[in-house]
Amino acid sequence: MAKYSFLRLILWTENLDETIGFYTHTLGFSLLGKNEDWQWASLRKDDVQIMLSKPNEHEKLERIGFTGSFYFNVDHVDELWEDLKMKTKVCYEIETFEWEMREFAIYDNNGYILQFGQPVNEISKAE
């Protein structure tokens, strides 16, 4: 049976440079590579890698869209919230949920929902 070892997202965007800017300047990702001919880029922050791409002629889309959200497990979630809450469009404010996660969500420049969470038991250990 096949073993799955890694998932790397490819987010479609109509404006590659603007999206690179959001992820590098707002969220602190590093640009690993960019290909103007392909309208493609690769970004990384810690153990998270994301690729960006402008849809090509094979991808028949009426609009950019995604029916879900992207969930990032982070440490120091409260500090990240303080850093991002005034820089971004907030989907929901930081909260501790009954499933023992402290989390919040924002929108990126394309309207994708980005959620950031930390288990409550990890917050207690860090203090």
Image (cartoon, grey):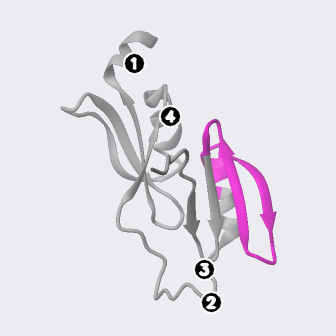
Question: What residue is disc 3 on?
Answer: 55
Q: Is residue 119 left or right of residue 114?
A: left
Q: What percent of the width, then of the height, locates residue 93?
A: 33, 43
Question: Residue flagged by tag 4: what amino acid is it?
Answer: Leu
Q: What percent of the width, then of the height, locates residue 86?
A: 49, 45
Question: What residue is disc 4 on?
Answer: 80
Of pointers 4 and 3, the one earlier in the residue sequence:
3
Q: On the image, which quarter does residue 16 sit in?
A: bottom right
Disc 3 is placed on an element classified as: loop
Q: CA distance from mark 2 to mark 4?
A: 38 Å
Question: Residue flagged by tag 2: what amino acid is it?
Answer: Glu
Q: CA distance from mark 4 to mark 3?
A: 31 Å
Of pointers 2 and 1, the one earlier in the residue sequence:
2
Q: Nearer the viewer, residue 77 or 48?
A: 48
25 vs 53: above or below: above
Question: Residue flagged by tag 1: what amino acid is it?
Answer: Glu
Q: What percent of the width, then of the height, locates residue 10?
A: 58, 63
Question: What residue is disc 1 on?
Answer: 122
Q: Nearer the viewer, residue 27 or 69?
A: 69
In this picture, which residue range is highlighted in magenta?
22-48
Q: CB of mark 2 within 8 Å of CB of mark 4?
A: no
Question: Residue flagged by tag 3: what amino acid is it?
Answer: Pro
Question: What residue is disc 2 on?
Answer: 57
**Foreground: disc 2 or disc 4:** 2
79 vs 59: above or below: above
Task: Name the residue located 36 percent from the left edge and 13 percent from the top edge.
Answer: 124
